[in-house]
Image (cartoon, grey):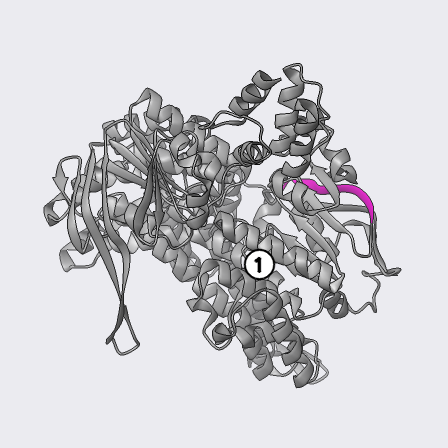
Amino acid sequence: MLRDITIGQYYPADSIIHRLDPRVKLFFVFIYVLSLFMFGNLVSYCLATILLVVAIYYAKIPVKFLIRGFKPIFVLLIFTTFMKLFITDGTVWFKLWKFTITKEGVIDVIHILVRILYLIIASSLLTYTTTPTRLTDALEQVFKPLNKLKVPVHELTMMMSIALRFIPILVEETDKIMKAQSSRCMNFSSGNILKRIKNLVPILIPLFVAALRRADDLALAMESRCYQGGEGRTKMRILKYKRQDFFVYILLAIYFVFSLIIHLLL
Amino acid sequence: MSIILDKISCKYETDMINEHYALKCITAKIEDGEFIGVIGHTGSGKSTLMQILNGLVVPSGGSVYYNGEDIHEKNYNLYKLRSEVGMVFQYPEHQLFETTVFRDVCFGPKNLGWSKKEIELSAFEALFQMGIESELYYQSPFDLSGGQKRRVAIAGVLAMKPKVLILDEPAVGLDPMGKRNILDKIAEIKAERNCTVILVSHSMDDIADYVNRVWVLDDGKLIIDASVKEVFSHKRDLEEIGLAVPQITSIMHMLKDKGLVVNTNVTTIDEAKMEILRKLR
Amino acid sequence: MIKAENIVYEYIRRDEEGNVEGIDRVLDGISLDVQTGEFIAVIGHNGSGKSTFARNLNRLLTPTEGSLWIDGLNSDDMENTWKIRQSTGMVFQNPDNQIISSVVEEDVGFGPENMGVPTDDIWKRVEDALNAVDMIKYRSYSPNKLSGGQKQRVAIAGVLAMHPKCIILDEATAMLDPQGRLETLQTVKALNKMEKITIILITQDMEEVIYADKVFVMDHGKITMSGTPREIFTNEEALKECQLDLPQALKLANELRKEGIDITEGLLTAEELVDAICQLY
């Protein structure tokens, strides 16, 4: 069950999108999400859809894989849509038993669905096509100016890349602990809320202990390999823009300006 | 009383898209009181098979019968199965969580809804059999040494009074004495409780020293299911799939290759000694 | 390469309020001398202090008393920290917890990056190191997709890329299966032979000791025995006292000797035992 979570993972493939400079992809997702929330009209949604489909196509990510990533948030998504659908006031379209469905409600829901779905697809496309190290390199580069404001950019990005490395390991660990406790006849799904929360203890404590042990080991390993923070450190990969990167920037600019114009005209 | 595996197969996903079979059509029968060793290199499907016996993994094909009942029938009580087929995972000490050793060992029995007296009696017995000193009962399990933690964790499974005990590499990572200690304890418990034991191990020497019957797994298939002697007489077959015979057996083979006509069907030091003495005297 | 004179390491136990509860002497007067290019094994049971000793060699810890020189550098001097850590690389027990990056080659580059090596140079070092451990094929893999032995080889490459003079393996094989163990040991042996890198192999597995030039046996923070593997293995009783065990082949040799068979003393491997028996025949 836990293995189904694919968000934040890297999907190894050799595609144009994979080879893009991570900073480009980062900006792309940023501008793209911005545009989704700024311009809420049919034409801009169409444009956004085209852009997304093209990106998915070139990224060579199987659609099956992409969809599986949604599974965990699917329930949440349905829940919010339903809530929104039934509680929004406005022109009544039709009544279903005790619930009224309004025109505004339906429109709102469409907005939410499109935005959230596209946001998730776009950002998971980013992580699918960019290794965590490349991503953190990009973040470090982009936020470098904040160093002057005494923000520990390197440390933060290092933390992030370590978190990304250990997420799959800890997921597996959780799976193993859950199995071990179920083989000791633990019942996860009975009782009231309080009981269920209490039921988490036999899972959470071993998990915390394991995470701490790993953190301890990792700190030692990093120290023994001369890690001493960002200072005096060189980089294995220096980010350098290439032709295709500028091309994508231009494409992105055209998309944004075009959407903006349509938004202003409508 | 028996476990029957009927054409068990199990699908497994490696990288989200591709599927392959972790287990392929495994058929076997486990009788009461057997001591079975399971060998196979990493990724041969040992762990998956063990979890199927315990009802933790549902096979994609075939059925498992415990005492004649299909464990994947709708109304089958999996809790009862898990209490009777106890499973000790690799590095079981990683599942400890309670404030004291004793409470941790009580966790399993408590889940079974036994009376307080029964629970405590069973926990005491399990801790005693695993050789945990009574001064440690009320200490935090996290303060114990590695070997002690391991024994406490095994006691936690024993306390449920399992009729079948599955152990996935119970000695891995311990020092030589710790290893011997744990395996000896398991053999003692097997004799005292007269239960069935299934031992997964990478050490052919341990398999040779302790078990009666061996399963050899390779690429999800059960390729050999026979007595220790029989299994280790297939030296070449084992080497082909990346396994070895016990060191003692391979010494006998080397002697034979040098022209000394010895019986190579020997797995323990005592047997080897007798055989060599017979030859030399 | 390494010179230790009477080093003591004390670990101060504190209670929850931070008051001193007791002092554990983990290392108790260790003196030894390791020459450049030697292959050293340090054995001892769990809790004998061998890991603490290893951490002192890497300046992850510093001795409470006594003096320790590593590659001519005094470990007492804070200034030497990074030089010492660069010249003595360390490989730890759990393969998962020492790989920092999500891509193999980036992990190997982590050390050189920290040392401030110029970018082009890092790539060369990474390639050389991955070639030396025969892992170049896996350069763009995620560590999660590798076997235990492969992960340890990546960890060794990560150390190699820092161009160390000495590699310390702190029970680096304890969690591996036989295949992974063999891979790791062969890699280390080759590095010792070809690149003349000093190896300090900390282990509890007696079979691994065979490869060493010199063995130190530790017990209760002291070095109780030292010498070549042959010398160490002749004294079964003393090893037993340190809670250690002989390899199977040598146990058999001792058993035969007890029966009055005249087998030469100071054997090391199964092959030697076979030859000795054949000579008698």
Q: Nearer the viewer, residue A13 or B110?
A: B110
Q: Position of residue C276 (x, y in %)?
A: 54, 21
Judge whether A125 appears above or below C19 on screen: above
Q: Is residue C75 magenta?
A: no
- Quarter holding the C terminus of chain B is top right
Q: Residue at x 61, y 27 (%)?
A: B251
Quarter of the image where one finds residue A86: bottom right
Q: Position of residue B111 (x, y in %)?
A: 66, 76
Q: Is residue B23 magenta?
A: yes
Quarter of the image where one finds residue C17: bottom left
Q: Residue at x 35, y 57 (%)?
A: A216
Q: Nearer the viewer, residue A143 or C107?
A: C107
Residue B23 lies left or right of residue C45; in this view the side is right
Residue at disc 1, secondary structure: helix
Name the residue beneath numbered marker 1. Answer: A175
Residue B40 lies left or right of residue C199; in this view the side is right
- Give the dominant element type of the magenta stretch: helix, strand or loop: strand
Instruction: State whether residue A112 appears in this view.
Output: yes
Q: Position of residue B22 (x, y in %)?
A: 69, 43
Quarter of the image where one finds residue A264: bottom left
Q: Residues within 10 Å of mark 1 (few under 14, many from 20)?
A: some
- Quarter holding the N terminus of chain B is bottom right
Q: Nearer the viewer, residue C216 or C192?
A: C216
Say which amino acid is labelled 1: Asp
Residue C272 lies left or right of residue A161; in this view the side is right
Q: Residue at x 67, y 19 (%)?
A: B256
| Subunit ID for the residue under disc 1 | A
Instruction: State whether residue A261 appears in this view.
Output: no
Q: Position of residue C59 (x, y in %)?
A: 22, 47
Residue B91 lies left or right of residue B206; in this view the side is left
Q: Which residues are magenta?
A: B17-29
